[in-house]
Image (cartoon, rainbow, N blue to C red):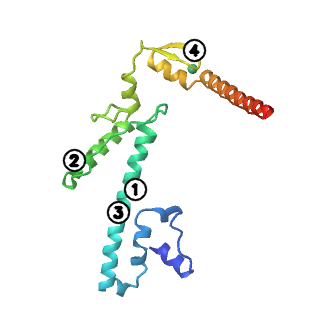
Amino acid sequence: MCWIRTRDRKQQPPDYTKGIFQTLGFKEFHEYLMLPPDKKDSEDGKMLLQESIENMKMATRRYARRQNKMVKSRFLDHPTREIPLIFELNTTNLSQWDIEVKEKAINIINSFITNSPCQYEHLKSNVCQEKSNLNAHSSNYCKDCERLIIGDKEFLIHLSSHKHMRVLKAKKRLAKFAEMKKDEDTKQTE
Ligand SMILES: [Zn+2]
């Protein structure tokens, strides 16, 4: 609040995309916090406070959705990344907060700090689960490289390998070359 006041005196509105001002609750409460003390208790002031609270709730929900998406895509769906253990805490029932969230979180952090096994189960990577469905003895034929590859995992590795990419690139180049040659031939016959 002091920050906002000093900045305002200098006629400089804070930049809500930088530093501490990005924190949830700054820009949502800006208008209310800028009111002189006597205005804060007026009907308009009270309404503004209610609006600010609603805006903050909305921004918090939006932020939580973004975070969930990030955890899922960067950690749980990432095929190669070494991921830290991720635990899911159920925050839906506020009356159970201490048991479901606070105590579990403290327990999880303690097990991390003391490097001891945790009594709660962490989330499994989606990629790991997929991997367990892979067949190690399947026959896979790569048409581009004209090669038979045994095992699903090996085939996936092959498809993203430099060797396979080189073959693909060479094929593309050849196709482009053939196309160019065809164009030239038709031009000559015209
Ligand atoms: Zn290939």
> Which tag, 3 or 2, sits closer to the chain's start?
3
The number of numbered discs placed on residues in the rendered structure image is: 4
**Residue at image x 43%, y 38%?**
75
Q: Are marks 3 and 1 in contact (CB under 8 Å)?
A: no
- Image quarter hosting the N terminus: bottom left
Give the residue furthest to the left.
95
Distance between the Cα atoms at labels 3 and 1? 9 Å
Q: Position of residue 134 (x, y in %)?
A: 39, 21
Front tag of 4 and 3: 4
Residues 107 and 64: in front is 64
Q: Is residue 143 above or below residue 66?
A: above
Q: In the image, what residue type sits under mark 2?
A: Ile
Distance between the Cα atoms at labels 3 and 2? 26 Å
Q: Badge 2 is on which residue? A: 99
Q: Badge 3 is on which residue? A: 58
Ligand 1 shown in quarter: top right
Q: Badge 1 is on which residue? A: 63
> Which tag, 3 or 1, sits closer to the chain's start?
3
Front tag of 1 and 4: 4
Disc sitting over residue 134 in the figure:
none
Q: Badge 4 is on which residue? A: 146
